[in-house]
Amino acid sequence: MFENLTQRLTGAFRTLTGKSKLTEDNIKDALREVRMALLEADVALPVVRSFIASVKERSIGLEVKEYLDPSQQFFLIVKEELTRVMGETCEELNLKVQPPAVVLMAGLQGAGKTTTVAKLANFLKQKQKKKVMVVSCDVYRPAAIKQLETLAKEVEAEFFPSNSGQKPVDIAKSAVDAAKKGYYDVLLVDTAGRLHVDEEMMEEIKQIHSSIDPAETLFVVDSMTGQDAANTASAFNSALPLTGVILTKTDGDARGGAALSVRQITGKPVKFMGVGEKIDALSPFYPDRVATRIIGMGDMFSLIDDLQNTADQKNTEKLARKFKKGKAFDFDDYLAILQQMKNMGGVASIMDKLPGMSQIPEAARNQVTDDKFKQIEAIILSMTKKERANPDIIKGSRKRRIAAGAGVQIQDVNLVMSQFSQQQKLMKMMSSEGGMRKLMGVVSKFSHLMPFGK
């Protein structure tokens, strides 16, 4: 996520390395690099101009703090300005209304709106313990209603039935009545994808809005459309009183233009972002965390949130007790961590949030794949129970047998043994400090697990 922007900004920060202070002359090149980075990221031009002006004003003549050099100070200013542009704080849904809180979902065709409805239903059920009903008012797209019904079953949300012969306004009103009678906390209303230039369709969604008086009206937009996402949201906002935006497909957005443009262009906050295809791949939008990720510092807070949401508490406590008794970290523990990482969305999801990953050559990063982790799993599973518990006994003949069992070369087994040895030392250090109460307290050290190269 945001890879291109991160790399360009990193180059901008380097231009100030070795400078004694920030001056108009020496930040000129850095600002030029930042401007080009933002434009290449497809950030809206008014946002770029405002951003550069703010960074320049804050930088020139600034007294650099003793513990920072000028490049670091500039780095922090850019991070703070990125956060400001995106909205400073995470804005939650306004659900503090007489139940059911109605959430109307609008958006363009192909933006992933119906899937996002299901993801939001899942988020509200799992994270906020809400009783959720969903309904589809999309009577135009073939199988749209059936798609939402299928997704509703997957997330165990109540589905209010509708059919293509009904009027969207009638469907929405009936769903509100049913949600009231069923004492539901939230009703999510999916609507047909439409263009803001389609007057007939825009009139229809206005009627739906006025008939159900939603607590939230969210615009769902594909982040990969860049600044067009912000412009389209702004056009919709002129016809419909939006309360927020959901950016989809941010996991495939290497630029970041939408995330950086939406708030300033529309005046509306980004409330969520889709971070993958899985039904739980929807995250609240934290501007400060996204800014930190954009400048290459990773996103440890989100990684820790992922950990807490997916952690197997039984295994966590088991490992904590093991360390407390002074027992060594073995291959069974290593396997448990690898499987936990897989539950957190796979390798790419984790790497995206680790600090400093943008500094690792792309060729090396590309070698860190889920397939590589499957290979490591296969190697560990080819070991006997005795070997996993006592790694020191794994020598020549055992390595050859393990390699044959996993279908790999003996060099692959040697690499896994080396990586395991590094992780074992790390875990020993952490356990001696008494800080290992949770399995993934090692989350900040995940880079030790990354199998770069062969």
Image (cartoon, rainbow, N blue to C red):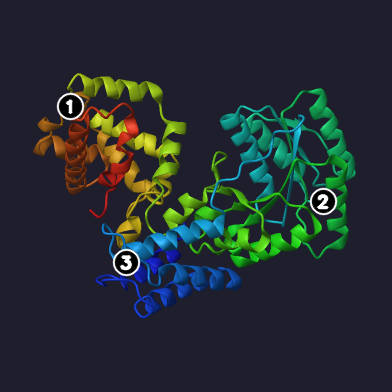
Closer to the N terminus: mark 2 or mark 3?
3
Q: For numbered disc 2, what is the local secondary structure? A: loop
Q: Nearer the viewer, residue 19 or 102?
A: 19
Q: Which residue is mark 3?
A: 71
Residue 375: in sight, yes or no?
Answer: no
Tag 1: Cα neighbours inside 10 Å, few (<14), some, or many (≥20)?
some
Residue 397, percent from left and from top:
11, 36
Q: What is the secondary structure assignment of the residue under circle 3?
A: helix
> Residue 4 is drawn in which quadrant?
bottom left
The quarter holding residue 119 reads top right
Which residue is at a point 17% across and 48% down the rendered structure image? 411
The residue at 38%/34% (across/down) is 340
Asked if one can make out residue 173 in the rendered structure from this viewpoint, the answer is: yes
The percent coordinates of residue 407 (x first, y second) are: 27, 43
Q: Position of residue 404 (x, y in %)?
A: 22, 40
The residue labelled by disc 1 is 328
Q: Give the amino acid at mark 1.
A: Ala
* Side of 352 relative to 359 (left or right): right
Which amino acid type is marked by label 3? Ser
Per the rendering, the mark at residue 140 is 2
